[in-house]
Image (spheres, grey):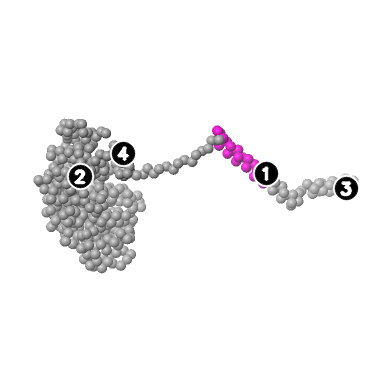
């Protein structure tokens, strides 16, 4: 009896299990329902998060923020258009009051020392095309017109240029030295303006620091094993062609010019055609610029002036880095190396000169010890005979001559500066002129830049 009863119990249990296990349709339906409930739960959670994100007035609407204006450009001394200066307070009539003679070579004589002149050149004037140092640019923006004063050092520098017009540039390599604000950059600009108006060809680099502060692109060249700066070379070619367009029409190549990635330029081609190749392909610009300088060094029709401001930067440590993140030497960059070749006399123009001006405005690029020794300048800090000097820098600085700029303005030169700014309404009209002049001249100790800053500091509306 026990066995049948056990068998019946097992059969009943199987029947119960068979009824309890759902079929395929029941499983699918249960699964769909579970997924539906899960999705619905997620929606409820998300809605709860949204409702909790901000607790405040339901009628409050967040307004879209207005796009921010670009504040990248420098706004200092930026002139406004004439249409925005219609109020009577802006009608100063400064242009009618400042009446100055234009700068011409005939005014660079001892009889004109202490006279103020204006730089009113054509559209291709060097200071418009090549640019200006920052300190001069700011002064010219404040003044009604670009101006300068003929000094004794101006006359002596022009005399040196006149003597160098028939000599190789290797014999006239001058570097203007002096304290900060004594007028080195102004003197270099006067030399450039004189050269252009006297039939010279001019290449003016107003900010040589831009060649070494890692602000331009650079690429490694396997052929020369140096780092090329195509963008800066491209801009230099464009500016040089604009300033010297008329003279370039009469010059031609003396030999075939090999060019990378294209056929050579045959001998007898115009230098304008050579420059055109560099301005069409930016990556050929360094090669074209080097070839152009070689051809300019061979021609004897026009004297050539190479003027470099921030000259000491060519000898300083650069901000460029190689793949190992080591600092690249300036003579391993194409543009500084090209300028150093002519500054050191390794390369020379058949007729012309090389002028440089030291700058102390940027303390990152101080005059190195090797350059100071070559120019005979005193050391900025105590040094010993055991200080190690770079032989390459000494080689590039060999033969440079210092052109000292006077530390102080003479009284007649300072009086001309004061008179010009007074006519330009930079001096309070009610202030006594003689007392103010002597006070500012004494406070500045005769320094040209400090004297002008002192004059502008007295301006009141």
- Mark 4: few/some/many CA within 10 Å (<14, 14-19, 20+): few
Q: Residues under labels 4 and 2: Cα distance? A: 27 Å
290 inside magenta stretch: no
Q: Residues under labels 1 and 3: Cα distance? A: 48 Å
Q: Check disc 4 and report the residue beneath it.
A: 87
- Mark 3: few/some/many CA within 10 Å (<14, 14-19, 20+): few
Q: Residues under labels 4 and 1: Cα distance? A: 74 Å
Q: Quadrant of residue 151?
A: top left
Q: 1 or 231: which is nearer to us?
A: 231
Q: Position of residue 429 (x, y in %)?
A: 21, 33
Q: 107 or 241: which is nearer to us?
A: 107
Q: Earlier in the sequence, mark 1 or mark 3?
A: 3
Q: Residues under labels 2 and 3: Cα distance? A: 128 Å
Q: Check disc 3 and report the residue beneath it.
A: 4
Residue at left offset 25%, top offset 62%: 272
Q: What's drawn in magenta, residue-wise?
A: 34-58
Could you tell me which secondary element the residue under label 2 belongs to?
A: strand
Q: Quadrant of residue 262?
A: bottom left
């Amino acid at each position: 009896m026990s066995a049948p009863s056990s068998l019946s119990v097992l059969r009943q249990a199987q029947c119960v299990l068979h009824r309890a296990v759902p079929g395929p349709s029941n499983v699918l339906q249960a699964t769909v329902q579970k997924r539906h409930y899960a999705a619905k739960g997620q929606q409820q959670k998300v809605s709860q998060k949204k409702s909790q994100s901000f607790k405040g007035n339901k009628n409050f609407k967040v307004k879209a923020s207005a796009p921010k204006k670009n504040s990248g450009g420098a706004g200092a001394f930026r002139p406004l258009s004439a249409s925005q200066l219609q109020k009577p307070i802006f009608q100063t009539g400064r242009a009618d009051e400042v009446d100055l003679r234009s700068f011409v070579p005939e005014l660079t004589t001892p009889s004109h020392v202490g006279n103020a002149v204006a730089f009113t050149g054509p559209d291709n004037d060097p200071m418009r095309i090549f640019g200006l140092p920052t300190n001069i640019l700011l002064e010219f923006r404040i003044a009604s017109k670009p101006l300068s004063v003929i000094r004794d050092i101006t006359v002596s520098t022009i005399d040196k240029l006149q003597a160098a017009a028939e000599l190789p540039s290797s014999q006239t390599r001058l570097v203007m030295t002096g304290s900060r604000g004594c007028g080195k950059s102004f003197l270099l600009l006067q030399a450039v303006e004189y050269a252009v108006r006297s039939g010279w060809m001019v290449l003016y680099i107003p900010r040589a620091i831009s060649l070494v502060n890692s602000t331009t692109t650079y690429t490694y060249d396997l052929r020369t094993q140096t780092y090329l700066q195509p963008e800066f070379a491209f801009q230099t070619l464009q500016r040089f062609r604009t300033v010297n367009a008329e003279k370039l029409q009469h010059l031609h190549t003396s030999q075939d010019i090999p060019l990378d990635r294209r056929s050579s330029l045959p001998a007898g081609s115009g230098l304008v055609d050579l420059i055109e190749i560099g301005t069409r392909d930016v990556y050929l610009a360094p090669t074209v610029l080097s070839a152009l300088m070689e051809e300019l060094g061979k021609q004897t029709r026009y004297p050539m002036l190479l003027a470099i401001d921030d000259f000491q930067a060519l000898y300083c440590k650069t901000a460029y880095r190689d793949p190992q993140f080591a600092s690249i030497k300036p003579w391993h960059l194409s543009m500084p190396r090209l300028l150093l070749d002519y500054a050191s006399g390794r390369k020379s123009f058949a007729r012309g000169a090389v002028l440089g001006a030291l700058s102390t405005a940027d303390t990152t690029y101080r005059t190195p010890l090797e350059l100071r020794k070559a120019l005979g300048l005193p050391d900025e800090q105590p040094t010993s005979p055991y200080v190690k000097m770079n032989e390459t820098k000494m080689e590039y600085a060999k033969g440079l001559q210092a052109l000292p700029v006077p530390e102080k303005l003479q009284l007649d030169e300072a009086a001309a500066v004061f008179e010009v700014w007074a006519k330009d309404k930079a001096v309070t009209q009610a202030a006594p002129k003689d007392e103010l002049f002597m006070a500012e001249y004494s406070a500045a100790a005769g320094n040209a830049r400090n004297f002008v800053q002192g004059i502008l500091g007295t301006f009141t509306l």
